[in-house]
Amino acid sequence: MLHALADATRRDIVRRCLGEAASVSRLADVYPMSFAAVQKHVAVLERAGLVSKERRGREQLVRSEIDAVRRARQALDQLEATWRGRIERMSDLLAEDEGDGTHGRDQH
Amino acid sequence: MLHALADATRRDIVRRCLGEAASVSRLADVYPMSFAAVQKHVAVLERAGLVSKERRGREQLVRSEIDAVRRARQALDQLEATWRGRIERMSDLLAEDEGDGTHGRDQH
DNA sequence: CTAACGTACAACCAAATGGTTGTAGATGAG
DNA sequence: CTCATCTACAACCATTTGGTTGTACGTTAG
């Protein structure tokens, strides 16, 4: 999921299809690469649930799933939350018990 | 940067080193892979600025850079912001000018 | 109907990834 | 000093990635 957003072209595709959907070939002539390459990028995004395709005539409209983007962002929020949790816990330990440096947390 | 966080092991390393730093070998015996593999993951995170290493005796302590995590998260925030921007702009267009569907935006 | 367009997919390729083992250099413990 | 530990790094390997070209198929325009 984050992997799908780790590519600049793919992030740009998501950005471009946020407001209004675009056909794959329209996307293709924006980027300096072949149609097939763009098609693959879209496929990666689709597998990750970040965009959906809807056939309209002979075109295939790509639309970004904003909720999926939000969910991806949450993964990083989680890291920050963990961080805040650690700091809090450390403060607690310092407040109530300063002697023991080897509390057995963090074991696998 | 997002690429560095796209791997589950690396995200876990970041999580683990958020509160207190850990030596590379300590990290290594947490994961089911060789020391060298963990070392490589740490190197990737370091190149991305997500962790920093500090030598302490013969150990190398790995510490996560919470600000870098925040910066990575901001990249995804940007996508959502773009989305909100698009919606806003669409509303504006609908409000003031309904006739023209082919305004020349989004050109490369 | 025919030609052009949009898509799908296979085959191929170079480079990056994620892993391994092995070797060698620093550093601390005894 | 000597040995065990921690780290660094090279060489190698399989798989994935990001790109290409070529071919085939469905749909729309004229």
Image (cartoon, coloured by chain):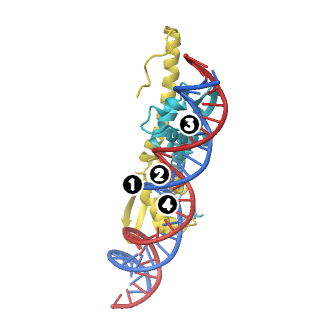
Chain colours: A cyan, B yellow, C blue, D red
Disc on the earlier residue, 4 or 3: 3
List the residue tagged with mark 4.
Answer: A98
Distance from the alpha carbon under mark 2 to that under mark 3: 18 Å
Q: In which quarter of the image is the C terminus of chain A?
A: bottom right
Instruction: Write the residue at 58% across / 66% down.
Output: B32
Q: Do the residues labelled 2 and 1 touch (CB within 8 Å)?
A: yes
Q: Residue B4 carries which label?
A: 2
Residue type of the residue flagged with mark 4: Glu
Q: Earlier in the sequence, mark 2 or mark 1?
A: 2
A81 over C20 or under it: above or below? above
Q: Is mark 2 on a helix, strand or loop?
A: helix
Q: Are marks 4 and 3 in contact (CB under 8 Å)?
A: no
* Both marks 4 and 2 on one chain: no
Check disc 3 and report its element: helix, strand or loop: helix
Chain of the residue on which disc 3 is drawn = A
Residue D26: image x %, image y %? 67, 31
Front position in the image: B101 or B31: B101
Q: In this view, does B81 lie above or below A104?
A: above
Q: What residue type is labelled 1?
A: Arg
Measured in 3D between alpha carbons, the distance from the residue under mark 4 to the one under mark 3, in whole angstroms, is 43 Å
Among the 4 quarters of the image, the one containing residue A45: top right
Q: Mark 1 lies on which chain?
A: B
Q: Name the residue under label 1.
A: B47
The dot on residue A69 is 3
Q: Which chain carries label 2?
A: B
